[in-house]
Amino acid sequence: MQAIRVHEQGGPEVLRYEEVPTPSPGPDDVLVRLDASGVNYVDIYQRMGLYKMSLPYTPGSEGAGTVAAVGPRVRDLRAGDRVAYCGALGAYATHAVVPAARLVTLPAAIDTERAAALMLQGITAHYLCHSTYPLKAGETALVHAAAGGVGLLLVQMAKMLGARVLATVSTDAKAALAREAGADEVILYAERDFEPEVKRLTGGRGVQVVYESVGKTTFERSMNCLAPRGYLVLFGQSSGPAPEIDPQILQWKGSLFLTRPTMGHYIATREELLARANDILGWAASGTLRVRIDRTFPLAQAADAHRALESRATAGKVLLLPG
Ligand SMILES: NC(=O)c1ccc[n+]([C@@H]2O[C@H](COP(=O)([O-])OP(=O)(O)OC[C@H]3O[C@@H](n4cnc5c(N)ncnc54)[C@H](OP(=O)(O)O)[C@@H]3O)[C@@H](O)[C@H]2O)c1
């Protein structure tokens, strides 16, 4: 089989395309022949060294394809089943061994490319607006990088819940996509300060929640956009890590809540994984939720996929396809 291997952390050039032995599944595992692998920002953090990794490793935490073989204790899956998953390392490859408990069987209406595009960012958007801060009809949310992979899905889900969505994006083209996804107001935050804009758009009251994925360049002003007892949900850092803060600041700025969630804790049980996955795949199958695949790259060109995502050039999902 072919895989992208990382032998030392660094720039995109450390992503090397190699021939490696095809692994056999352990007793509770499944060997999946991948049709598509999702590229996510976390893959960049791991590659750069922001997160510690044991080397060498195969990047990628999300994929979809067909079951090629199952371990002896796996009962509910068999060769040929179409499956998708997220949260298991090793997806930048033609094949991956995945614990059976992480796999979701795909409905007939969803092809494997769309499934690979939906799993990680879709489940993230789902837990953010249904569990971390469950949005209610009539509330207002601020979504940064609203034309990103998570962003476009989060805007749609927030609208499904009846919230008003204020969105930030860097370009006019991204603004059009955020509006198409349902954003009520779009702010070009690379051109103008979003903080006074949010205050103006909320009549000075502020928003109930900020879904904050940009980090360094937006974090402090995001806090200033919140209504008293509002939630700052810091779930990413695409511009760099958020600054350290004194907890007292949460009192001064209105008895605010700050949380730093990560997907693993919101799909910790099989039941929770299936509930979220069934929601997003069902919505996608019925056309209620649209997933935008921005571009695909051959697996061997994983480095170019990283360059595209890092350079802020993408809007929606980036996928790797085995050659
Ligand atoms: N905690 C979790 O469970 C979880 C799960 C999934 C993703 N995440 C995080 O969510 C964030 C978004 O992930 P994603 O995969 O959907 O990526 P993405 O939003 O598609 O891409 C990142 C976007 O961030 C914006 N951005 C602002 N400043 C930037 C900068 N200096 N450099 C690069 N981008 C910048 C860009 O949008 P504009 O051009 O519009 O500014 C860019 O397109 C990432 O930080 C990721 O780690 C967290």
Image (spheres, rainbow, N blue to C red):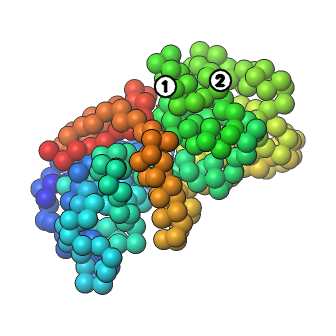
Q: Secondary structure at mark 2?
A: strand
Q: Is residue 60 left or right of residue 135?
A: left
Q: Residues at badges 1 and 2 in contact (C-beta under 8 Å)?
A: no
Q: Which is nearer the eye, 282 or 143? A: 282
> Which of the 4 quarters of the picture holds residue 107?
bottom left
Q: Residue 185 got which mark? A: 2
Q: Residues within 10 Å of mark 1 (few under 14, many from 20)?
A: some
Q: Is residue 272 left or right of residue 22?
A: right
Q: What amino acid type should be assigned to the residue bearing mark 2?
A: Glu
Q: Say whether disc 1 or disc 2 marks the residue closer to the N-terminus.
A: 1
Q: Residues within 10 Å of mark 2 (few under 14, many from 20)?
A: some
Q: Residue 177 got which mark? A: 1
Q: If the image is split into quadrants, where does the N terminus sit?
A: bottom left
Camera sees residue 190: yes
> Which of the 4 quarters of the picture holds residue 209?
top right
On the image, the x and y values in percent for residue 84 come to 34, 58
Q: Which is nearer the eye, 224 or 321? A: 321
Q: Which is nearer the eye, 223 or 140? A: 140
